[in-house]
Image (cartoon, helix red, strand yellow):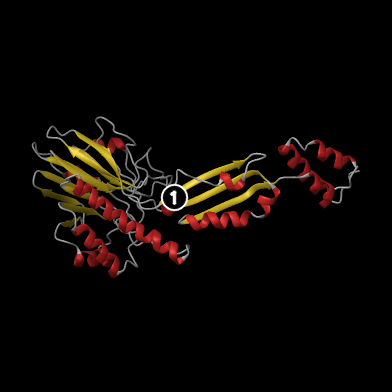
Amino acid sequence: MFKLLLTGDVHLGRSYQKEEPEVAERLSSARFQALQNAVDAGNREGCRFLVIAGDLYDRVSAITAEDHRKTAEILAEFDGDVLIIPGNHDYLDPDNNRLWSKFLERSPSNTFLFEKNGLKQIGDVVFYGCICHDKHSAHNSLGWLKEQPAAEDGLFHIGIAHGAIEGLSYDAGQKYYCMTRDELLAFPMDAWLIGHTHVAFPASPEPGARIFNAGTPQQTDIADNSRGEAFVLTFQDDKSVSFFPVRTGVVDFVRRTVALSHGDSLRSRLVFPDLDASRTVLRLTLSGTAAQDEYESRSAVFRALESDFVKVEIDDSALRREITPAMIDQETLPGTRINQLLKGYADRPELLNLAYDLAVLCREGNKHVD
């Protein structure tokens, strides 16, 4: 029996150039810390192997010597063997291999990089690395396995690949090394360790599962729905495999929608006790009706919120201010039918806002309503 820590899609060196410098540095550093957390979890759980199933780095160029140094120092702390395959972001191009040659200059002695499709035996475990050779490919890297002899009894056989899995990963154009589950399971592997898809699968323990993708140890951005995890897999002597996730993420990207009803306080609705603001990037979408004073001072409310979180993105385009009788009298002539109509909706805020908008449109369109 042995344990293995699976991760992938670490995307070290991601620059976050569109962010403010302080936020960009926080998000970039979080990726290295997530890798450190994965290594620490593997050591804590007594894992014999650490497998990085592609995209250790975010790109093949502009990875600095400092990035390589920090990566090597983290991997050197793992107590067992580290195995890495190049993914589609950090693919290995034999004609221009500066990224991985620089990595190998600093890589620790416990680390093995698959520089081509091939196998690596360590004790009673044989790993089959299926690497990426370009950013995009209409064909996966499994073909060479068809030439391999039948698996020898008594050894563990584990495939490592990077790419989309049909039905589990989005790849409408089939340009990301697309594989099918049937294709993977046709090979005599005790398990497949897959990278590329940032959403982990299986999502929960699944008896008999042989295909595992741990997602990413650190969410990349607000569109990333992963949980920031790695997998600890246990291989029993009878070749059965079980797993459980371990938390590795450092920054959480969270989306929230807040709909204000009439009488709600904007300030009180923008309190999120379930979130650790110090580690959260929050995208907030607001709608509904806010009291006039809070609507007019909402920028100050937003600034206070932004001071607590790593970053806050707010869309308040659907947030409306409360329509008051004083506003109606300012916009329409008291006693007119439109004035009386609007005041008649005073106890129905949603209809009042709609009626008010129509009145404004009529006025702007030079349509006079008496």
Question: Residue beneath label 1, please?
Answer: 253
Name which residue lies at 76% across and 39% down.
352
From the top left corner, tell me how far across and down residue 296 is, in percent. 68, 54
From the top left corner, tell me how far across and down residue 208 is, in percent. 24, 30
* Quarter the N terminus occupies: top left
Q: What amino acid does circle 1 point to?
A: Phe
Q: Nearer the viewer, residue 171 or 303?
A: 303
Camera sees residue 55? no
Name which residue lies at 21% across and 48% down.
42
Q: Nearer the viewer, residue 280 or 70?
A: 280
Q: Is residue 209 above or below residue 55?
A: above
**Dot 1: element:** strand
Q: In the picture, residue 14 is in which quadrant?
A: bottom left
Name which residue lies at 51% across and 44% down.
256
Q: In the picture, residue 66 is in which quadrant?
A: bottom left
Camera sees residue 64? yes
Q: Nearer the viewer, residue 67 or 307?
A: 307
- Relative horizontal placement of residue 70, taking residue 264 as reference (left or right): left
- How crowded pointer 1 is (Cα within 10 Å; few <14, some 14-19, many 20+) is rated as many
- Relative horizontal placement of residue 13, taking residue 78 as reference (left or right): right
* Quarter the C terminus occupies: top right
From the top left corner, tell me how far across and down residue 344 is, in percent. 81, 36
Q: Is residue 133 above or below residue 194?
A: below
From the top left corner, tell me how far across and down residue 287 is, in percent. 62, 44
